[in-house]
């Protein structure tokens, strides 16, 4: 079939795929990684695929309609997110109004968590995919191509013409990740790498995974709870190194790889094996990765990773208060909570010694939060002094335990999905705690960001860094 994989129009540079979808103050814009991987699978199985990332390319709904008509597209796979879901449904309705014969499948974390609720938003919607959807899309396309009943497609929730909603059996998670095509091949074919930007990374960059899943159960973390699960699955070391080689050879403009694994260092032996393979191949491409502060990474491992290309770790430090850390289930073992901040300082110190920078992620508004604990978080961030930092009001998303707990306690005062963003598309928490309003959470994050970045000690550090390294000078500017 001729199929369009669509990241639908919304706010310009709306970063739909990031863990907290929004227009970001840093200008960060994520690649449509999951959508692109599904497009690669469709191409591999003989379909004529197209990919449009409308927020990145500045496409309007009419431009998407014109493209569908010009290419005689028969099916659309449409990405979604919680803050944009009402817009996304409206886009699908517009596409179907222009071409009623289109087959449309909605994908993404929101529809995965609330499939029936999503289908109820519009009679125009026929089907949504649950969790990892690459093979669900493949089988849905095959069913549509031959006119088969959708009941044969695992991982689908769909509606019969009679209006009856059907939950098909769940689809097992993909075990052999090496089966999947390189997502960077799809980027190269359809996207402009210059459109995508991470505030903490060198630009331009590409993004891919070396694993899926995370064994931790942080209450707020959306991907493991709604998409990739808690069981670790790894690409082979050779397969990951091959993709590094592909990017180096075929995408010479790229300055950084961002490994978007939920948590990069889970198995230390496997991480060391990957590092040694990259060193053996002579990898010169720097990479950044998501990481935890309490993994107990030894200096030897970090030094080897730096030699392999590790440039920066993006770390969820979250809070400076132990009770807040405990309340968000940051650790699988409560006994580790008391030592969490000590381990965080040690991790940052070891990274510095190894030559690896750290981007710190801090969050306010979790269930045990108080005005005093928020100030502890700001003080914690300044004392850690990561290379860069972000401060977020909590964004509770359907499918997470944080969302369910906030609903149970009646902390979510707004049920309109549009309220998850400001009118300009920026983050807007909808959680009102007993002693803190959602406006206060957002206001604190703005103040914390200014206080962190305008700290004289931080400015001096950045000046020295910029004078030492021309690439970092460009990024800092």
Image (cartoon, helix red, strand yellow):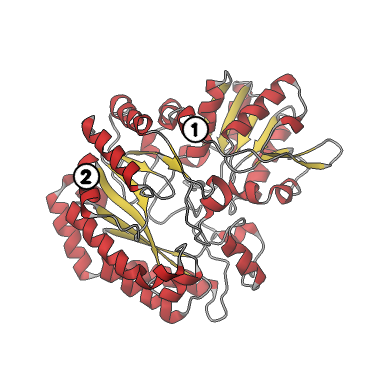
Q: On the picture, is 22 further left or further right than 287?
A: right
Residue 290: x percent and y percent?
A: 37, 50
Q: Please tell me in which quadrant of the rendered image residue 31 appears.
A: top left
Is residue 258 something that shows in the picture? yes
Q: On the picture, is 297 further left or further right than 209?
A: left
Residue found at x 52% / y 72%: 439
Which mark is drawn over residue 304?
A: 2
Is residue 58 something that shows in the picture? no
The answer for how far apart the CA atoms under marks 2 and 1 are is 27 Å
Residue found at x 40% / y 28%: 188
Number of marks in picture: 2
Near-viewer residue (69 or 297): 297
Which mark is drawn over residue 176?
A: 1
Residue 50: x percent and y percent?
A: 54, 26
Q: Earlier in the sequence, mark 2 or mark 1?
A: 1
| Residue lying at the far right of the rendered structure | 162
- Measured along the vertical axis of the image, is residue 161 above or below residue 330? above
Residue found at x 23% / y 40%: 308
Near-viewer residue (355 or 188): 355
Q: Secondary structure at mark 2?
A: helix
Q: Secondary structure at mark 1?
A: loop
Q: Quadrant of the N terminus?
A: top right
Q: Residues within 10 Å of mark 2 (few under 14, many from 20)?
A: some
């Amino acid at each position: 079939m001729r199929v369009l994989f669509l990241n639908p129009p919304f706010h310009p540079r709306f970063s739909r795929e990031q863990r907290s979808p929004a227009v970001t103050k840093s200008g960060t814009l994520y690649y449509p990684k999951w959508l692109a991987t599904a497009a690669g699978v469709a191409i591999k199985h003989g379909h004529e695929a197209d990919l449009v990332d409308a927020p990145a390319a500045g496409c309007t709904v009419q431009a998407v309609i014109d493209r569908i008509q010009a290419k005689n597209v028969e099916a659309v796979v449409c990405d979604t997110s919680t803050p944009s879901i009402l817009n996304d449904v409206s886009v699908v309705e517009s596409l179907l109004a222009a071409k009623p014969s289109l087959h449309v499948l909605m994908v993404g974390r929101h529809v995965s968590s609330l499939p029936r609720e999503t289908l109820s938003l519009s009679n125009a919607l026929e089907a949504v995919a649950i969790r990892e959807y690459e093979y669900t899309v493949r089988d849905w396309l095959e069913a549509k191509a031959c006119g088969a009943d959708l009941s044969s497609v695992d991982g689908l929730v769909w509606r019969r013409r009679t209006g009856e909603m059907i939950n098909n059996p769940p689809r097992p998670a993909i075990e052999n990740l090496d089966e999947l095509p390189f997502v960077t091949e799809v980027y190269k074919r359809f996207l402009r790498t210059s459109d995508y930007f991470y505030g903490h990374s060198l630009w331009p960059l590409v993004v891919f995974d070396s694993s899926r899943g995370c064994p931790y159960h942080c209450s707020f973390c959306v991907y493991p709870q709604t998409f990739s699960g808690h069981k670790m699955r790894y690409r082979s070391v050779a397969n990951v190194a091959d993709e590094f080689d592909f990017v180096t050879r075929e995408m010479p403009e790229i300055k950084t790889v961002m490994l978007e694994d939920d948590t990069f260092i889970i198995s230390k032996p496997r991480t060391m094996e990957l590092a040694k393979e990259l060193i053996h191949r002579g990898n010169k491409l720097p990479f950044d990765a998501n990481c935890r502060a309490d993994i107990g990474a030894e200096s030897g491992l970090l030094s080897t990773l730096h030699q392999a290309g590790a440039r920066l770790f993006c770390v969820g430090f979250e809070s400076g208060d132990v009770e807040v850390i405990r309340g968000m289930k940051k650790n699988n073992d409560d006994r580790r909570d008391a030592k969490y901040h000590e381990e965080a300082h040690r991790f940052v110190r070891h990274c510095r010694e190894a030559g690896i920078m750290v981007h710190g992620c801090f969050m306010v508004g979790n269930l045990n939060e108080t005005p005093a604990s928020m100030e502890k978080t700001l003080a914690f961030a300044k004392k850690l002094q990561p290379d860069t930092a972000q401060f977020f009001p909590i964004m509770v998303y359907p499918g997470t335990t944080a969302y369910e707990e906030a609903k149970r306690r009646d902390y979510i005062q707004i049920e309109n999905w549009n309220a998850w963003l400001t009118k300009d598309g920026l983050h807007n928490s909808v959680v009102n705690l007993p002693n803190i309003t959602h406006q206060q959470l957002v206001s604190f994050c703005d103040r914390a960001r200014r206080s962190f970045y305008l700290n004289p000690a931080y400015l001096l550090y950045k000046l020295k860094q910029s004078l030492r390294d021309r690439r970092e000078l460009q990024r800092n500017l």
